[in-house]
Each structure stands twice: as C-alpha cells, then as structure tokens.
Image (spheres, rainbow, N blue to C red):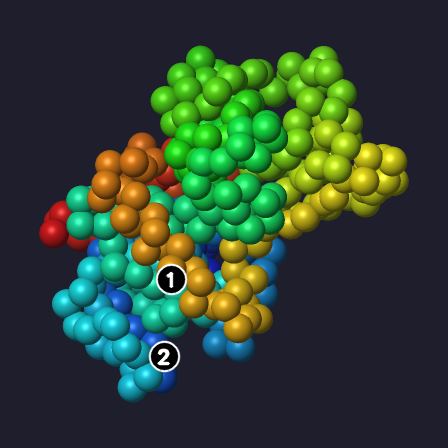
Amino acid sequence: MKAIGYTDNLPIDHPEALLERELLTPHPGDWDLLVNVQAVSVNPVDTKVRLGAPVGADGFRVLGWDACGIVHSTGPEVDGFRPGDRVWYAGDYGRAGSNAEQQLVDARLVSRSPASLTPAQAAALPLTSLTAWEALFERLGYSAEPSEWNRANPLLIINGAGGVGSIALQLCRLAGIPVTATASRAQSRDWCRQMGATDVIDHAELAQWPEASFARILCCHDTDRYFDTMARLVAPQGLICALSSTKEPHQLQPLMSKSAGFVWEFMFTRSQYHTADMGRQGQILEAVARLVDEGQLQSTLTETVTGLSADNIRNMHRRQEEGGLIGKQVLLLDGRER
C-alpha cells in the first residue's frame, strides 16, 4: 500500500521532508479495524510531529490523524462494525497515521460516519470535534445541553476561525453558551459569526479588555503568547483550557488569588494511556455524527486537494505552517466521492 511519511525531522521546503513509500498491508489486532482510507485532513499536530517527534524503530513514520474510510476487515474482539461500513476517526498518536491507502485503528475510537456528508466533508471533523467536545464538556465543565449555568458563564475562544474553534463555536451555539471569539481578518470574523460566535473581537483587543471578563477561556492557538492575558481575563473561580504545548515557563501565581484553574486538553490522552473510558471517543463521534445528520452541525471543510502524494501532503503542511487557515483542508485520496 502507498503511504506518506518522514524519515527525519526536516523543514517543509526540504525535498525529503515527506516521502512516499510502499508498505505491507497491516493485519488487524484484536480490537482493530483495517480501513480503506478515502479522505484525510491535516491538523497542526501533523506539522509538529514531523518537525520534532522521533521516527521510531522502523525509520519511517506515517502521519495523519483524521480520516474517513470503509472498513475492510475487523479483529476478533470487534463488535458493532463489519466490512463495508463507512467510518470516521482521529485515531491514535502512537500508531501509523491516515496518510496511507489503508490504516489500522482501534474500533473503540471509531464511529460510523455521518450519512449526510461526503468522505471529504467528514474527514474535516473527527479530531477537531473530539478536541472541542472534550474541552468544553469535560475540561471546562459546560453541559452539552442548554442550561442556566451555561448561560451564566461566558466563554472566550482564542482563534475562533481555526479547526477546533470552528467546531467549538457551533457546539456553544447548541449548548446556549455566550461566546466571544478572536479573529483578525474580516473573512475570519464573518466565519466566526457564521459558526455561532455571540461576539467577535480582534486578537489585539484582548489587551484592552476588562479584567476578569470570562468565566472560561479556551485557547486554540499559542499558549505562550496568550498565557498572561488569559490569567488577567479569567474570572474568579474560572478555568483556562489550552490546546498547544508551551515552550516557555509560566507563573501560575496570578491565578491563585482568583482560585482559578488551568487545564490541558490533549485529544490523544485516552488512546495513549488506554484509559478505562477510551471508548468514550467513539461515543462522542456518534453524538457528533447524529448532530451533523440532524443539520445542527456543519462540516468545516474549506479546502480540498485530490490525490495521495508526498507533494500534496507537503503543500498542505506548508499551508498549515503559514497560518491564517479558516476551517479545515482535506485530501481526497482518489478523487471519487462515494
């Protein structure tokens, strides 16, 4: 099978930053699905892993943590899936990724793809949907259903037009959470309002925003850049949730007098540590698929590329590293939407 990966941590303009290889088709383990991949999405984690993560013992690492595809075969412990099912998932950080014609994925991390979406539309959603859902409803304490508590605790989302922000804004709208999003360009601001933002402000305006304005803050961009600002803006007894790892040390002391907290959201925690509730991710994807098919959530696909090749994946990584993306970019492996 064809796969795209890397052998060394190289900048994206290096000709060997990403390479094409022919690999043996893997065989499902007890809990695995072997999936014929139809479409994949690129996320910030792809570029970060390519630039900094070890390759591994076999000397070639396949990236990709968003996919939609057709089940080819299943492991002996798998229940609820069979060959021919169309599924979607974000997978496992520690296993070979979805930038390949076929991929193994633990069935507990998978659900059936929304029937109303094409493979490309579906592939834009799993990782960002899981991240947004876990951040809002498991880390920050909001309810997935509208409630008085949700309405009384305003949220700030930093980088509302990105992949995670675009889903989080839609979930906030459904849950009745008043949410302010940051966006700098007119197109980004319009997108945030379309996704469900109550208010949209420029990133630069945060410095002038009144102290303790937000009960909850979700940082979907640069934790280092915004940490001090978030510590100032979070309300007493509030919470900050960040997605991006830090490169600098930060003082938690400013949060002490507010009895405020700081938490991380890392979508791969359940699969990396094989937590007892690992199957919760499959359940979240089921819930998201249902909301999509009911017309309450929309795909955040904004760019589609056709053909599995190192050049195409390289160009998608370059776009990701340049920044300024609205929504998600997706690669359709063979050009056929089926």
Comparing 275 with 311, the one in front is: 275
* Residue 173 placement (x, y as % from top left): 42, 30
Above or below: residue 133 compared with residue 195: below
- Distance in Å between CA atoms under marks 2 and 1: 13 Å
The residue beneath circle 2 is 31
Q: Count neighbours of disc 2 (C-alpha within 10 A) and say few if under 14, some if 14 to 19, many if 20 or more.
A: some
Along the polypeptide, which appears first: circle 2 or circle 1? 2
The residue beneath circle 1 is 282
Residue at screen point 43% across, 60% down: 281
Comparing 26 with 251, the one in front is: 251
Q: Is residue 313 visible?
A: no
Q: Amino acid at mark 1?
A: Gly
Q: Which mark is residue 190?
A: none
For label 2, the SS is loop
Q: Is residue 30 left or right of residue 151?
A: left
Q: Is residue 225 left or right of residue 9?
A: right
* Residue 165 placement (x, y as % from top left): 48, 34
Q: Amino acid at mark 2?
A: Trp
